[in-house]
């Protein structure tokens, strides 16, 4: 089942299947290591859902909800 990273719950693991978005947002996600095939764990979510923190490639990454909505992932 694929869904945007922004819809994952704390503690849930996933694997990125696609990075959507346009221009700067897409490039920023690629530069931060959010690429197809990478596995991640949802670590924290702010009370209103923005920002979120995920762990991937051995480090913690904080994303805005709008950025995280641009990356689709499958639940592991």
Image: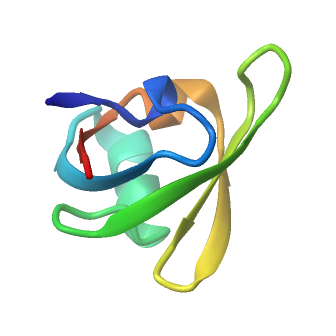
Which residue of the protein is positioned furthest toward the bottom in this rendering? 58
**Residue occupying image coordinates x 26% and y 64%:** 35
* Quadrant in which the N terminus appears: top left
Residue 60, quarter of the rendered image:
bottom right
Does residue 67 sit above or below 47 in this rendering? below
- Residue 25 image position (x, y, % from top left): 43, 42
2 or 12, nearer to the observer: 12
Vertical comparison of 46 with 34: above or below: above
Does residue 54 sit above or below 12 in this rendering? below
Looking at the image, what colour scheme do you see? rainbow
Percent across and percent down for residue 61 are 64, 62
* Residue at 47%, 32% in the rendered image: 8
Where is residue 54, by image quadrant?
bottom right
- Identify whether 49 is placed above or below 35: above
Q: Nearer the viewer, residue 47 or 11?
A: 11
Q: How many labels, in total? A: 0
Q: Quadrant of residue 48?
A: top right
């Amino acid at each position: 089942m694929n869904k945007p990273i922004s819809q994952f719950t704390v503690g849930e693991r996933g694997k990125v299947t696609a990075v959507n978005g346009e221009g700067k947002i897409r490039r920023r996600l690629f530069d931060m290591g959010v690429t197809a095939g990478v596995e991640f764990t949802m670590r924290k979510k702010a009370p209103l859902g923005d920002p979120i923190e995920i762990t991937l490639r051995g480090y913690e990454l904080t994303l805005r909800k709008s950025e995280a909505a641009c990356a689709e992932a499958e639940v592991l």
